[in-house]
Amino acid sequence: MPTFQSNPLNPSPTHRLLKKYPGLFGIPFVLIIVGASFGLQSFTQTRYDLQDQKVKQVTHEQALGLDRKKKKFDIREEYYKLSAASEQDWEPKRIQRPEGLPEWGVPPTEPPSTNS
């Protein structure tokens, strides 16, 4: 005899009903999925409406001709402009060194001696 009996002594009416008709277990699940789909429809419609408004704003700016005034950005061109400007507008100036600092910087310190 097994330790647990397969048939409970007092089965509930719900248990008997589900045992007799197992399809009843999936019906609430399917209803929730279908209901959620209809419930979320308004949110997804709002999302697509907002995206459509953004696209229409961009096309409105294009209709005004704001795109024609803009120059296409090229990183290489900007680099050459900045490098040419930096070569022309500056000259090296020497600053005074702090008191006590030698002309060529700080002399290296002596390494610790190892007596082996």
Image: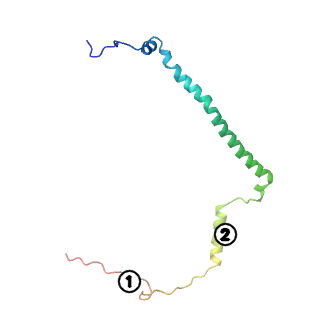
57 or 13: which is nearer to us?
Answer: 13
Q: Residue at x 46, y 12 (%)?
A: 17
Q: Residue at x 36, y 81 (%)?
A: 108
x then y, percent, for residue 103: 45, 87
For this view, does 31 lie left or right of residue 9? right
- Quadrant of the image occupied by residue 92: bottom right
Q: Residues within 10 Å of mark 1 (few under 14, many from 20)?
A: few
x then y, percent, for residue 85: 65, 74
For this view, does 30 lie left or right of residue 111? right
Looking at the rendered structure, the kind of residue marked 2 is Lys
Residue 81 numbered tag: 2
Residues at circles 1 and 2 in contact by the CB criterion of under 8 Å: no
For this view, does 21 lie left or right of residue 10? right
Query: Which mark sits nearer the N-terminus, 1 or 2?
Result: 2
Query: How is the protein colored in the picture?
Result: rainbow
Looking at the rendered structure, the secondary structure element under dot 1 is loop
Looking at the rendered structure, the secondary structure element under dot 2 is helix
Q: Residue at x 52, y 21 (%)?
A: 28
For this view, does 30 lie left or right of residue 42? left
29, above or below 7, in the image? below
Q: Residue at x 60, y 29 (%)?
A: 37
Query: Mark 1 — residue?
Result: 107
x then y, percent, for residue 5: 31, 14
| Quadrant position of the C terminus in the picture | bottom left
- Quadrant of the image occupied by residue 67: bottom right
Q: Residues within 10 Å of mark 2 (few under 14, many from 20)?
A: few
106 or 2: which is nearer to us?
Answer: 2
| Quadrant position of the N terminus in the picture | top left
Looking at the rendered structure, the kind of residue marked 1 is Pro
80 or 94: which is nearer to us?
Answer: 94
Cα separation, mark 1 vs mark 2, equals 40 Å
